[in-house]
Each structure stands twice: as structure tokens, then as C-alpha cells.
Image (cartoon, rainbow, N blue to C red):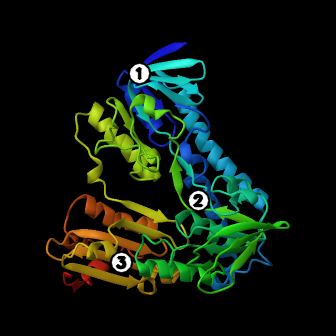
Amino acid sequence: MTNTHDALIIGAGQAGPPLAGRLTAAGMSVGLIERKLFGGTCVNTGCIPTKTLIASAYAAHLARRAAEYGVSTGGDVTVNMKAVKARKHMISSRSREGVESWLENMERCTVYRGHARFVSPREVQVGEDRIVAKQIFINVGGRALVPDLPGIDRVAALTNTSILELDTLPEHLVVVGGSYVGLEFAQMYRRFGAAVTVVEMSPRLIAREDEDVSAAIKQILEAEGVAVRLNAQCIRFEPRGAEIAVGLECASGAPVVTGSHLLLAVGRRPNTDDLTLDKAGVDTDARGYIIVDDELRTSAPGIWALGDCNGRGAFTHTAYNDFEIVAANLLDGERRRLRDRIPAYALYVDPPLGRVGMTEAGARATRRPLLVGRRPMTRVGRAIEKGETQGFMMAVADAETHQILGAAILGTGGDEAIHGILDAMNARIPFTVLQRAVPIHPTVSELVPTLLGEMKLVPAQD
């Protein structure tokens, strides 16, 4: 059967459903294809389920610290993993079902369930249906990368998706990958009560961050009992009875770590390899990401790529912003571009890291004169009151224009407080305007003007 629509959206992640809403509201007939779970990574295997689990882990951690606040819990703190999983499942399912119901009942929107494959630049096959559309929007997301490491085919390895199905506590979880996903699961499971070892090939954790951020996060995790093994240059796996041996060949420490469970958290790959994009004339890069221009158009006229599959963000908020850019350009007569988006994200270890713009190292690499400021969380009243003084605040600005180039807040509330700086950067105002603000006391945000006022000149480097 051949069906014709004004527009076709492939994938019901964070960009697809709101785009369907805008297009149908504009009077267009829209087809939307989803082959598995509505809501994409965020709703099903990313933000919502993982942050729900992190909340449970934080509750257990705080309960164990109750005596520090003068509170007695009346005994040992235990974690019911089946109840933890059930809570996660309830919250995630509710969100997924909400997205699905919205699309199913959307006027002028037809939902197709199945695997989409391009037949031509304007035709997509889904089961017995052939769908024709003038405009096609690809929003297929990504999945965990499973590296071809020695012995990987001989052991049972978890990914960020399959680990969500655990309802028992691992005796010893070995996490391969010392970046965002791996560190969140590492701290979470340590707080649930598991022994945890993080294995990272690089000399430090989260290598894209500044060295002081990496060092501080390593210290935070190790203080909670997470073992961190860096410089693991030849990672390999082998079964040892019911356990998994991970070979490391690290510069120091035992050459092998043995655990009951293995989590691979070494990156993501786009879900583009089975769309037959070549038949549509859509180009991808060497890693499979769809190549897009500044307005998210692909190499094929009339086809756009949004979200994780274009390699231009890999976050829920950037995927949603992709939708906003496309909708504004197509429907509102605007000219919005990717280049105007200021990068911002958070790492949800506890305390969290909020990041915006350049790192200090990145700013120094521009060889311009800079203003740099730092303040430890031990000098933030809100952190002291909460008994959570780990971490620090940092900001870097152009010494001549006074434009903020980047900032990091590693500390309690850092994922929220960073938005004041992000707003100032989006408004393109000099930091002196934010410095004159009068924030509410007692908050973490109230120290942002103080931090900016204490910045010191760093001369331009040759």
C-alpha cells in the first residue's frame, strides 16, 4: 500500500514528536514511523530512567549519612533493587505512554510501527506500507557502542540499556569507560551497595573536561569506595567461572580485575546503518553520523536529520533544539542555525557538574588574554549548610570584551546554577552585567557574581 503525506518523520525521539505537532498544527499531513519505543533514548534508556535510579541511590547515600545531620535511621540502610527498578519502570513508562498517546491522537498525524528503509529520496518502506513525502525528517537516535575488544564475544556484557533491567545487586560491577555514562552508573551502584571498579584507557577520567575537574571527580568517587584504574592500554576479557576477568595492563595496580558484572560505557553509535540511506542520497561520515549543514539539512534536498544521529549534540536538549531550529526556519520565516547554539550539559554524578561553553584549556588555546576565576564549594554557604562541600566553581572570560567564554560548577546544585551563566552567554552580555545582579541568599547561584568579580588576568600565550 502506498500512502502520501506532506511530511514524514522517522523516529519518535525528542525532536520527532514536537516537530509532528508543529507541522500538523500548520495544516500539514504527517506520517511518523517508530520501530520500537516512543520517546527515544531519553525516555527509555537515558535521562529519565537513569536519573530516577540516581535519585534512589542518593536517598540511600543520604540515609547512611543521616547521623551527620543529627538524624537516626534506626539501623542499617538496605536497598530493595526490585523496588528501585519498579519505580524506574513506572516513571519511564508513564513518560513513554504519554508521548505515544499524544501522537496517536494527533489530528493529521498517522503513526506507522516498524522498521523504515529508504527506497528513494522521497519514498520509505515500512513493512507492507510504502510512504511518499515531500519532506522527510530523520530522528533515529543512537545506541551503545560495543567495541571489538579481545574476548568480548566470550563474556556477558551489559550496556546502558541492558543494565536497566537488573533487579539484583551486582557483587562487583566493572565499568569499562570513565566518562559520563560510566561514571554515573559507577557511583549509583556503589551507593546501592556493590563493589565498583572503573576502567579507563586514558590517563584521566572524562578527558574532554579540564584536568582539575577530572581530578576532583576522581577524588569524589574514590572517597565513596569506587576503584579507578587509568591508563588501561590493552583491555581484554575472559570468563572465569561465573565471573568476568578484565585484563588491564595498567601502569600500576593488579593487571587483572575480576567482577561479577561488566558494563561497557565507551561511547555511542548512530542508528543509521540499516536505513539504506544511500538510496536517498544521504551522506554519512566515517562513524555513520548523518552529515548536516548549519540548518540541519542533509546532502539530499528535502531531507533533514535531527538529534543524536547527526552527531551535532547527543543530548536531549540539543535534539529538542534541533526541532526548534527546523520548525522556526520552515514555519516561522526565521533563520536559526546550529552555530548559534552554546554548548551546555551536565554530568550527573553527585555532586553534579554543570558545564557551559569552553573549558579553560580550550579558552587558553585561543591565545587571547583571559580572565579566570575559581571558588571552592567550601566557600559557598549553601553547600556548607547542606554538608555537601565537594567541588568548585570556575569561569573564564575574554579580558578585552568581557564576554564569558565558559564555566563549570562542580558542586551541589551545579546543574541548576550554571543556567545563570548560560543565560548571560546567550544574551551576549558582558560578565559585568551579571556581576551586578543581586541573587537570592542562601543559594549556590548567589556566588556567581562573586566568582566573576574575583577573576584574575591570564595574559595571552604565545
**Which residue is found at the position 27% from the left and 52% from the top?**
339
Evaluate if marks 1 and 2 touch, with contact meaning CB atoms under 8 Å apart: no
Query: Relative to the observer, which residue lies in front, 272 or 455?
Result: 272
Q: Secondary structure at mark 2?
A: helix
Residue at image mark 1 = 133
Which numbered circle lies on residue 394? Answer: 3
**Residue type at numbered disc 1:** Ala
Separation of disc 1 and disc 2 at Cα? 37 Å
Query: Relative to the observer, which residue lies in front, 175 or 117?
Result: 117
**Residue type at numbered disc 2:** Lys
Instruction: Determine crowd level at label 2: few under 14, some 14-19, many 20+ residues with C-alpha closer than 10 A.
Output: some
Separation of disc 2 and disc 3 at Cα? 25 Å
In front of the other: label 1 or label 3? Answer: 1
**Residue type at numbered disc 3:** Met
**Looking at the image, is mark 1 or mark 3 earlier in the sequence?**
1
Residue at image mark 2 = 51
Q: Is residue 117 above or below residue 188?
A: above
**Which residue is found at the position 33% from the left and 29% from the top?**
302
